[in-house]
Amino acid sequence: MTTSRTSAAIRVEGLTKRYGRRAVVDDLSFTVGSGRVTGFFGPNGAGKTTALKAVAGLARPTAGRAFVQGTPVTAMRPDARILGVHIEPCGAHPGRSARAHLRSLAALAGLPRRRVAEVLDLVGLAAAARGRVGKYSMGMRQRLGLAAALLGDPEILVLDEPVNGLDPQGIRWLRTLLRERAANGGTVLLSSHMLSEAAQTVDDVIVIDQGRLVHEGPIRDLAGSGHTGVVVRTAEAERLARLVDAAGGRVRPEDAGGLLVEGLDVAELARLAHGAGILLEEIAPRTASLEDAFFGLTGGTSR
Ligand SMILES: Nc1ncnc2c1ncn2[C@@H]1O[C@H](COP(=O)(O)OP(=O)(O)OP(=O)(O)O)[C@@H](O)[C@H]1O
C-alpha cells in the first residue's frame, strides 16, 4: 500500500449547497488521493450525500466546485470509464431485472454489453440477474448499485453508504474488492456514518459535521486523537481528584462513579494514590477508540 499522496483524483473547493436559506454543505474543501480508499464520514444529515452528488455531477453547487482528475465537474455526468457512482436511489425500475437495468446503462454509456455479465459476476448477482429489482433485498440493491458503478471499470469509484444493508460476509467481500481496486491504482471515495466499521477499509478520512470539514488526513492519525487517560474507581474519589489536580492532571467523572484521569499515566496515578493511602478498586488505561475520536470531532451531533 502506498502512503504518498501523489495526485488528487478528486478535489473539492469551497463547495456550498443551500436549500432555501440553509447551507447543507458549507464552504467545504478536501482532496481525495489517487490509488487510495478515502472514507467520507459524518453523522446523519451532515451533508455527505449532498457533497457526493456535487462530485458526481448530480447536484449543482450554490458556490464552489468539484474537480475530477483536475477537470471541473459540470452538470454533465463524467465518463463512466473515469468515474463510477453509486448513490441511492439507484434509479432501477422495480419491475425490471438487474440485467435489463444494467444493459440500458451500458448502452447509454457506450460500454460493451459483455460488461453487464462481468459486473453481475463481480458483485455476486449473476444467479439473481433475471429477477425483478423490486423484489431485491437491501443488500442485493447495494450490490446492483455497485455493479452499475463498476460498469465502466472506472478509475474512481464514489459510493454513498455502500455498506448499508450488507451482512458481515458482504462487508468483508466489499472491503476486499475496494482494497484490490486501490492496490491496482484505483481510487475509492465512500461515505459512512460508522467510522469504526469502515476503519479497516480506508487509508484516509474526511470528516464533516453540519456541512463543514472537521478533519482530513490518514486514518492512522485519527485513532489516538480522542480522549485517552486512565480510568479509576475508588471510594475516595473526591480526595483523589484533588491530588490529581495538584499533580497537574485533569479529572472527568465517568459513568457508574468512575473517574477518567488525563495527564497522568497508570504508574504515576497508582503511585499518587498509594502515597496518600487511597485504595483503588480499579485502575486501567483507556485508549481512545475511533468512535470516540469521531464523537470528539463531531460532538456526536445529528440533524
Ligand atoms: N433536496 C433537498 N431539499 C432540502 N433539504 C435537503 C435536500 N436534500 C438534502 N437536504 C437536507 O440536507 C441535509 C443533509 O443531507 P444529506 O443527505 O446530504 O446528509 P448525509 O450526511 O448524507 O446524511 P445521512 O447519513 O443521514 O444519509 C439534511 O438535513 C437533509 O434533510
Image (cartoon, rainbow, N blue to C red):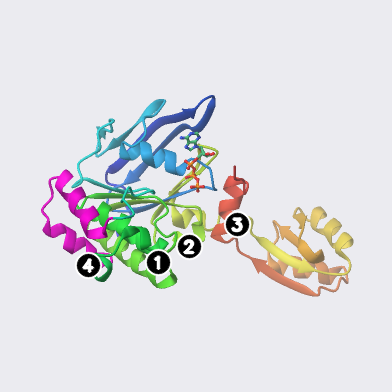
Q: Which mark is residue 121?
A: 4
Q: Is residue 69 magenta?
A: no
> Who is closer to the viewer here, 208 or 277?
208
Q: Amino acid at mark 2?
A: Glu
Which region is colored magenta? 96-125
Q: Which residue is mark 2?
A: 197
User: Callout 4, which amino acid?
Assistant: Asp
Say whether mark 1 is within 8 Å of ligand 1.
Answer: no
Residue 139: quarter of image: bottom left
Q: Is ligand 1 closer than 8 angstroms to the Cβ of mark 3? A: no
Binning the other alpha carbons within 10 Å of mark 1 as few (below 14), some (14 to 19) or many (20 upward) gives: some
Instruction: Tell me the element at label 1.
Output: helix
Foreground: disc 1 or disc 4: 4
Quickly name the residue at label 1. Answer: 171
Local crowd at mark 4 within 10 Å, few (<14), some, or many (≥20)? some
x then y, percent, for residue 68: 27, 39
Q: Do the numbered discs 2 and 1 sit on residues whose CB atoms are within 8 Å?
A: yes
